[in-house]
Image (cartoon, helix red, strand yellow):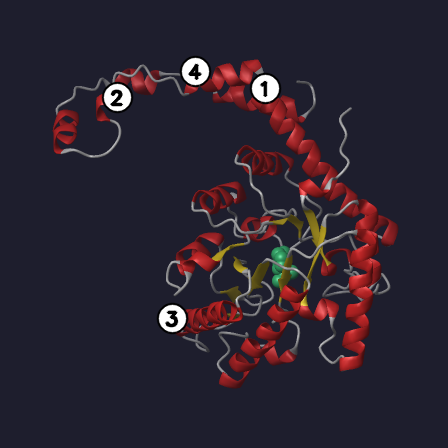
Amino acid sequence: MSDYTPKPEHKFTFGLWTVGNIGRDPFGTPVRETKSPADLVRLLGEVGAYGVNFHDNDLIPIDATPAERDSILREFKAALAETGLVVPMATTNLFSDPAFKDGAFTANDPKVRAYALQKTMHAIDLGVELGAKIYVFWGGREGTETDAAKDPITAIKRTREAMNFLCEYVRDQKYDLKFALEAKPNEPRGDIYNATTGNMLAFITTLDHPEMVGVNPEVAHEHMAGLNFTHHVAQALEAGKLFHIDLNDQAFGRYDQDFRFGAVNLKSAFFLVKLLEDNGYAGNRHFDAHAYRTEDYEGVKDFARGCIRTYLILKEKAARFNADPEIQALLAEINADDGSLTPFTGGYTPEKANALKNYTFDRHPLGARGLKYERLDQLTVEVLLGVR
Ligand code: DIG
Ligand code: MN
Ligand code: MN
């Protein structure tokens, strides 16, 4: 039995809103009492988290007086010092207050757009004060129920204008801060702009300072869109844009369930952990999830420990996969290269193109070859089932 005890170097983090989720849903009132940010930090310390993240108003209520703000911050900082937890990421709540009912940066009302910028600058200041190096933007209300209300191109331009403004603000303040954009296809809006991580990667290339901006993919959000989350994370990693990641789980085709990591799709969670670990992902492993509504706070701790343990167990399974002789022999066979087509590899030359155009292929053996993927996948499943 291996040791699945979390360590700071694992960089497991949770948002205040995750373990602080009081179980309200569209059809039910809260089932758990509200805990203070300081108490939530202590709960996270107890389960072995490395860090805690927050939306501005998770920490400082939107109507807090300056005195209340100071008191909350003092207690929060004391809890951080007591537990040793750090604050790697911060973000802005631009989705709860009715002012943002038509979005924030994409709202049709210019006053709302300006208020969203103001609120975000203050929230960035707070995040940096507490040590955040990553700033997440999740545009939960940046969408529509009817395209009669908003031109989608205008929405893109407004989003770009806001991001460019805020990148300049961070540069002007000389903050050591990078932005991570989080996609979601819908909910709470009927449709949300920049619906997938792929959209975000394309959008980033149109910004004035694309080097400051990456993505924060979330398992549940790509699953809601019916997509292979590992492929989206791979594209972000390969592009050097995986600045953060929201780990949880989600049944396909459902509302945003934000389940405990690995609670639904163990095999896809395995391939995700393998991708992150094989590629030396050095960022935070952030669990943007919450406990079932059935749970009390002991259950919330079970939820948090389960996220961490499942990640560490799958990390060990990935190491077993990589060390399994039969699996590795199969992969070597599948990827065998007799070198006969090496002359055509590498960069383009007119000579290569001409030679390749005139090369004689016998396509029949290419199609007749058995690729042994059934055996490979069965071995993978058996690693996951613990019999290899
Ligand atoms: C929801 O998936 C969003 C918000 O919780 C937050 O803005 C972001 C931070 O990870 N994820
Ligand atoms: Mn979510
Ligand atoms: Mn998220």
Q: Are marks 4 and 2 in contact (CB under 8 Å)?
A: no
Determine which of the numbered discs, if any, sits on residue 333 in the image.
Answer: 4
Q: Nearer the viewer, residue 33 or 191?
A: 33
Query: Image quadrant of residue 99?
Result: bottom right
Quadrant of the frame with the C terminus:
top right
Could you tell me how far apart the alpha carbons at marks 4 and 1 are, in whole angstroms?
16 Å
Give how far apart the Cα atoms at labels 3 and 4 are. 49 Å
Q: Could you say where residue 332 lies in the image, as x and y percent from the top left?
A: 45, 17
Q: Is residue 344 left or right of residue 143?
A: left
**Tag shown at residue 323:** 1
Ligand 3, seen in the image, is in the quarter at bottom right
Q: Which residue is mark 3?
A: 153
For marks 3 and 2, the one nearer the N-term is 3
- Would you say the residues marked 4 and 1 are in contact, meaning their CB atoms lie under 8 Å apart? no
Label 1 close to label 2 by CB (< 8 Å): no
Q: CA distance from mark 1 to mark 2?
A: 29 Å
Which label's residue is closer to the chain start, 1 or 2? 1
Earlier sequence position, callout 1 versus callout 3: 3
- How packed is label 4: few (under 14 Cα within 10 Å), some, or many (20 or more)? few
Q: Amino acid at mark 4?
A: Glu
Real-space Cα separation, disc 3 to disc 2, in angstroms: 46 Å
Residue with the mark numbered 2: 342
Q: Is residue 263 visible?
A: no
